[in-house]
Image (tube, helix red, strand yellow):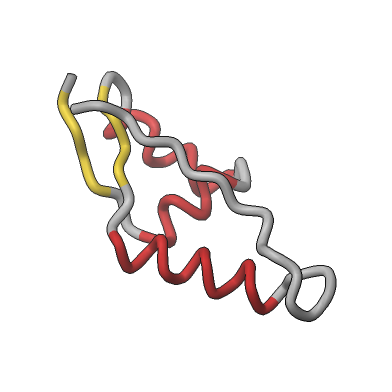
């Protein structure tokens, strides 16, 4: 299966089921969407800044997909 790296904004639209994300469906159909390390860093920062209590671990889980 072909892999494609998606921009942080595109990943956000898709994750939130935002209507703008639908524009990317034709380009992503039949492909594996990947995110960059910078997108991971942005998601981790947002999780830390929005943690329910100071010092609590952010509720993130990662899934690795074999290539």
The quarter of the displayed image where residue 30 is located: top left
**x%, y% of residue 26?**
32, 29
Against 13, is 58 above or below? below
- In which quadrant is the C terminus drawn? top left
Q: Taking 43 as reference, is 39 left or right?
A: left
Please tell me how many numbered marks the rendered image carries.
Answer: 0
**x%, y% of residue 38?**
32, 68
Q: Nearer the viewer, residue 14 or 55?
A: 55
**x%, y% of residue 2?**
16, 26
**x%, y% of residue 48?**
64, 73
Q: Nearer the viewer, residue 36 or 53?
A: 53
**Residue found at x 83% / y 74%:** 53
Q: Taking 64 as reference, is 4 left or right?
A: left
**Residue found at x 58% / y 44%:** 19
- In which quadrant is the N terminus drawn? top left
Q: Nearer the viewer, residue 46 or 25?
A: 46
Q: Taking 47 as reference, is 62 left or right?
A: left
**Residue found at x 79% / y 80%:** 54
């Amino acid at each position: 299966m072909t892999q494609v790296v998606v921009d942080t904004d595109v990943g956000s639209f898709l994750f939130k089921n935002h209507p703008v994300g639908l524009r990317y469906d034709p380009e992503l159909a039949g492909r594996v969407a990947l995110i960059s390390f910078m997108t991971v860093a942005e998601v981790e920062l947002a999780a830390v800044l929005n943690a329910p209590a100071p010092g609590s671990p952010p509720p993130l889980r990662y899934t690795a997909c074999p290539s």
